Amino acid sequence: MLAHVARPVEILSSPAVSAGLLRVENRIQRLSTSSRLPLINTAAGRITGAGGKRLRPALTLATALALGGRINNRVVTAAACVELIHAGSLVHDDLMDNAAERRGVRTVNAELGDARALVVGDFMLAKAGLAALSSASKPVAETLAAVVVELAEGQFQEAAELFDPGRTPEDALQSITRKTASLFRASCLVAHPAGRSMAAYGERFGVLFQVLDDLLDLASTAERLCKPVGNDLRQGVYTLPLLMALRHDCGDVRPFLGRRLSQDEITFLLARLRRSRMVDDTLEYCRSLASDALASLPDIADPQITAALYGLPTAYIDWAESLVVR
Ligand code: IPE
Ligand code: IPE
Ligand code: MG
Ligand code: MG
């Protein structure tokens, strides 16, 4: 199952990026098990050791190479910190979503309860900040601290708009830009002093990435994703694919908004949405985001990295499409 999930990141995995990712992996494991309390190490190591695509650290390494940098200790640390922030935010996200499974294993909240999941997530976010400050650089640490703020704002906004039938596609877009795209942008920013030239690419890819995740929650299966589906409807998160579908051929779904749904209603709605234009419209929207992302790429000397960064958004869309159940 994981082999299926791992595919899109392979496009970024030139020999240099792959070698760098091995070093990043080592750093991630050391950082997530560096508490003086063994139980914290077990809990944090549980999520970082369970896999995941490692897309954000791969983007950091590819960006460093694209901008003429080398994969040195500072870049490896920056990439590991990005992944640690991602994993810490997933611990918090699963707590907020009351999710029981992540990366094919039980979540920290399911295993140890909400209170411990809360502080394990805090531990991971804070460790990332400390490591960035001590082993990367002050600007990298500042960028990562700022992204944790933005992430919290995006997640807060989403939480504040749960079950809100008045949520608009623009509201959803603003929330995902903060909660997800900001970390992809930061993955580029921390890679190199000239990382800003890749920031727009990272952010646009990040929006596309979350929109596809939202689509798969409505149009795939738990077996294919290694995480539950229908969760967003269950939790009252009205995502961009759903909100756009309401404006097109799914106006009849609107009476289901604004309240908790039974499992039967969720099953009915998923089938209804999969039969609609939602999947095609969302994929088309993502293709336009992909072409915006490519248009913002700076000139890159290395042809292998150029091909990888050009190919990533489309590869991701194709991968998501392969997981859709119609
Ligand atoms: C999941 O991110 C959370 C979202 C922002 C949608 P990923 O799909 O990158 O999760 P892992 O790291 O591969 O588990
Ligand atoms: C991503 O949103 C969460 C973060 C950015 C922390 P989701 O809630 O959609 O992620 P999944 O679907 O649980 O992986
Ligand atoms: Mg979630
Ligand atoms: Mg999701």
Image (cartoon, grey):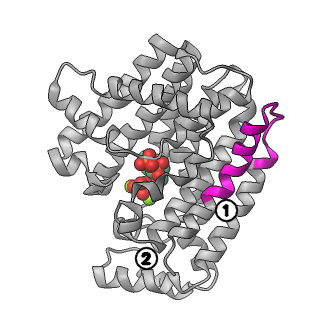
Judge by depth and name the residue closer to the eye, 103 or 284: 103
Q: Tell me the residue at 50%/63% (across/down).
A: 214
Q: Is 289 situated left or right of 74 in this image?
A: right
Residue 305 is one of the magenta-drawn residues: yes
Quarter of the picture holding the N terminus: bottom left
Q: Which mark is residue 286?
A: 1
Callout 1 secondary element: helix
Q: Is residue 300 above or below residue 234?
A: above
Q: Which residue is mark 2?
A: 257
- Mark 2 within 8 Å of ligand 2, using the beta carbon: no
Q: In the rendered structure, which segment of residues is drawn in magenta?
A: 294-316
Task: Categorize mark 2 by other alpha carbons within 10 Å: few (<14), some (14-19), many (20+).
Answer: some
- The image's mark for residue 267 is none
Mark 2 falls on what kind of element? loop
Residue drawn 48% across the image and 74% down it: 219
* Residue type beneath disc 2: Leu
Q: Nearer the viewer, residue 43 or 249?
A: 43
Which secondary structure type mostly characterizes the magenta part of the structure?
helix
Observer-nearest of 128 and 60:
60
Q: Residue furthest top?
A: 134
Location of residue 75 in the rendering, given as x and y in whole percent from the top left corner: 56, 21
Choose top left, top right, bottom left or bottom right for residue 303. Answer: top right
